[in-house]
Amino acid sequence: MNKYTKTELVANRQSLMRTFIKPEDDASRLVLIKYMEQISFGLHEFLRKHVGITEQVSLKDLSGRFKNTLISKNPEKKLTDVITEIVEDIAPHAVNVASPYFIGHMTSAIPFFMVHLKTVVAALNQNVVKIETSKVVSILEKQVLAKIHRLVYRRSSDFYDRYVQNIRTTLGCFVEDGTLANITALWVARNSLLAPKNGFTGVEQEGIQAAYSAYNINRCVVIVSRLGHYSIKKAGGLLGIGNQNIIAVDVDADNRMDLDCLKKTIRKIKHDGTGIMAVVGIAGTTETGAIDPLPQIGAICAENRIYFHVDAAWGGPVLMSEKYSHLLEGIDSADSVTIDGHKQFYMPMSCGMVFFKDPSIMDAVKYHANYVNRFGSVDLGIKSLAGSREASSLILDSALKIMGSQGYALLIEHGIETNRRFAEEIERRDNFELITRPELNILTYRICPSDIKRRLAEADSEQICIINKELNKTNRAVQRRQRAAGKSFVSRTKLRTGNNPGKEIVVFRCVIMNPMTDIKILNEILDEQEEIYFSLSPLLNIQHLTQNG
Amino acid sequence: MNKYTKTELVANRQSLMRTFIKPEDDASRLVLIKYMEQISFGLHEFLRKHVGITEQVSLKDLSGRFKNTLISKNPEKKLTDVITEIVEDIAPHAVNVASPYFIGHMTSAIPFFMVHLKTVVAALNQNVVKIETSKVVSILEKQVLAKIHRLVYRRSSDFYDRYVQNIRTTLGCFVEDGTLANITALWVARNSLLAPKNGFTGVEQEGIQAAYSAYNINRCVVIVSRLGHYSIKKAGGLLGIGNQNIIAVDVDADNRMDLDCLKKTIRKIKHDGTGIMAVVGIAGTTETGAIDPLPQIGAICAENRIYFHVDAAWGGPVLMSEKYSHLLEGIDSADSVTIDGHKQFYMPMSCGMVFFKDPSIMDAVKYHANYVNRFGSVDLGIKSLAGSREASSLILDSALKIMGSQGYALLIEHGIETNRRFAEEIERRDNFELITRPELNILTYRICPSDIKRRLAEADSEQICIINKELNKTNRAVQRRQRAAGKSFVSRTKLRTGNNPGKEIVVFRCVIMNPMTDIKILNEILDEQEEIYFSLSPLLNIQHLTQNG
């Protein structure tokens, strides 16, 4: 494929300088345009030809091809060859997340202009850690943060006039992803609970040990439903309170936090020398898309003076739909809210955000350095987990202008409504069982033929366990076979039915966010699963269970 | 500027779908090409016309223009108008970090192909948190990590054959930036020190309080020179040991960690119930570019069984220069090493990396979830601070192929050698004083006319303080004036001369990493500073000091 001989590729100053020089004549402009066409259209052509998800090659075979660990001294390839290689050799074995048949994860097609905007950000190469390497882009970031803050908290115009460009306060923060957003929120929550007082200079400065002693407690906990994202546990480990102190409370039949359990947990904990760092509500659980009862959780937190964080990494942008924003009612009672840009804002990988009700609360995590982030400057890096950061705000700001909230609303509404039709279709089919009814655009289901459904209805709990075990094997096998075939992709997870830890069942998990995914495609996916199931069933015990039922 | 009337811009399903559709006919191809030309050449044209750094507009004026906090319901602008606006209204007020006159921070021009590679990554939109949304890209990431690991640790071919694609181990991790790389390393260090034992399940699970009790200690510290990056302090706060427990040891006359101080600190600490989580060596301090004596620190750590981390965020890529890699001798004795991709690998914002000598040590920070990151899978998100991440590895891998190590070496050597010539020029000029002699491509200096130099040489410490105070005002004023003028940019910081905290002086800080920055440009920058100094000096007391000297 490389049509240049190795000897032609030598690193020297002259060829090096060329890579830094701006295209100043028509010839070099043409070369650059050729590259760009190759990137955009090479990839587009490829993705169009391959409506499927990925080539059917095993990971083991693939990994055998990526074992060379030496960096070549001289250049190995020209840009054009590198791009050709990516289009021809990498892309077919990557995952076509843009396919409407890819409904397994929270990654999807993005509007084409997002790629252009990412290019703009890369070309400007601003570093928003400090004003000296970003200037107006830092100011723009504050404005975008205020726009999303206003979407979430709906404070007064006066409030936003006062804070949008206030250099001493911050309404939120861009981070790498939802995990880091949740970590940032809980970092602030920890430091707010264990704040400086009476000679104690605060947990950030003195550490957990000294803080517990100053506050006369022996542990700190975070309370979240057992469907909480695993980043909450990670935050507990990272922040030094211990991940075993992330208390998982049960959920109700609709997978929402059980309020009685929450109240009971708080009551119990309050009397045993435990500090409650935060209660985390979820607006769109990762596995089922359920939304916790935010107004009630907010009220319980207010009553008990507990920090309330909402993980709306997934569901946040639903606020842009006038039709469905009521689902997130109560989100404005949260002290902080996580929203991911690369999820339902359809931004490219990756962009997380966290917002704070109190514009001064991030003071609890501020850091300075002499050469950067000076006191009293606009430097955004003063209150931020990361240091150097790219200007993701420029992408979001532009996208909001191009789409309008109504454009986003159409996407959100398409997902929710298509998902409802999908649920109906699953229920209509004999071989499937709908496990979680869609609240947003996520649902779970499994293969469970009607005769087995009947058996399950009559079985005792021991028999249910045996049958579910076989169903789990079946569903796992079908998902793997479908994934390997590469025509479509549905993810799988394990869910508990009710709050009984003994009864985990394997389910297919679908996320409908690609506007090209319609009910016709969803039916094809169900057809394929049925076919795989029939082709596998002689090998599986489930058939045996049925025959002896 | 917007030639479309508002009423034309309505969010409807049809126009929305267009933004997701791949260009399938020649007409839509042409539209896309037009956009891309506009982005690339619009920005290039702009940057070419404006050799300067930024337009001379105050932050206050700018922020007044970015105060609208409402998201418009219907689209406000078309993509083409958004791009025009960025080129015409945003770019002039951003910072032209690509200018060879921008020598103030660790952000610089990047080769033009980096922008193309970022575009490729955005178009593929893989999420490397899991194999199901990245497949071959996760495998490629493991290979690239092994390449850089090998550059740093130079283990045997057998070692790399065994680990490059091993799904149970990891040689490192891509993170957002150097701060998160240092945090990840110290997270691993904390969990290694306070590991599970005798019924204690480890600090990650049980928290700091329980860990201290299990290990019978009352605090944990990290030792770093007082020139350590502020992310080390941030890590101390975040990880729950308290940022006051980041112990700053003194440096020698060359700004390298003082080994006697290190030994004394360790000796003293070892007997007072303190756990030493890590010693951090720096390979390229942010402010002066100095490299700590890594082989000696490594030996001291080995002798005392202390975790050794090297923050080579800046200096790491120097390993690619055969001529200067010896400066980083001893880096392979570190348990972990931070290297930034967006610094001397010249990648776009932002990309950090951390490498571990022991391929299993990241087991101390692993997290799973049912729907993702399954046990025994290749999922990279199992051992990673962040969750969703873009495929930065694809950019670095391609860049290594296009540049070769020799291409990078030329950049590194240009920086180091140009910086040496710059130091000579500063010393040659009467009005300047070289403060830190360059070891890599960073130096600091200040305005200090020769008559004042003479006065300083004869002054007692009280007089020195008075004179330095005036010099500080002068240098601060000159840097600000130069920055505001927008023709060139040099940063400033405060440094202690010797290890006396009372004697901080304000210095200019220069980072020579742009291959277009040559001695001619550096002389122009010095000329400009002299001019500003002369224009300001009637206002400044320094003149007064001289006259009465």
Image (spheres, coloured by chain):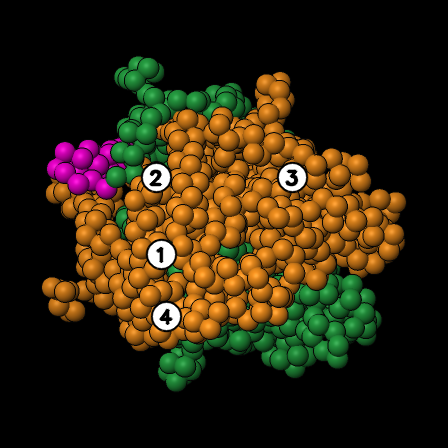
Chain colours: A orange, B green
Instruction: Give the CA distance from mark 4 to mark 3.
Output: 41 Å
Q: Secondary structure at mark 1?
A: loop
Q: Quadrant of residue B162?
A: bottom left
Q: Earlier in the sequence, mark 2 or mark 3?
A: 3
Q: Which residue is mark 4?
A: A537
Between B274 and A494, the one lying in front of the other is A494
Instruction: Give the CA distance from mark 1 to mark 4.
Output: 20 Å
Instruction: Give the CA distance from mark 4 to mark 2.
Output: 34 Å
Q: Which residue is mark 3?
A: A293
The amino acid beneath tag 4 is: Ser
Q: Which residue is mark 1?
A: A489
Crowd band around label 2 with a 10 angstrom C-alpha radius: few (<14), some (14–19), many (20+): many
Q: Which residue is mark 2?
A: A515
Magenta segment: does it hold B530?
A: no
Q: Earlier in the sequence, mark 1 or mark 4?
A: 1
Is A472 positioned to the left or the right of A261 in the image?
left
Span colored in magenta = B22-46
The subunit letter for the residue under badge 3 reads A
Crowd band around label 3 with a 10 angstrom C-alpha radius: few (<14), some (14–19), many (20+): many
The amino acid beneath tag 2 is: Pro
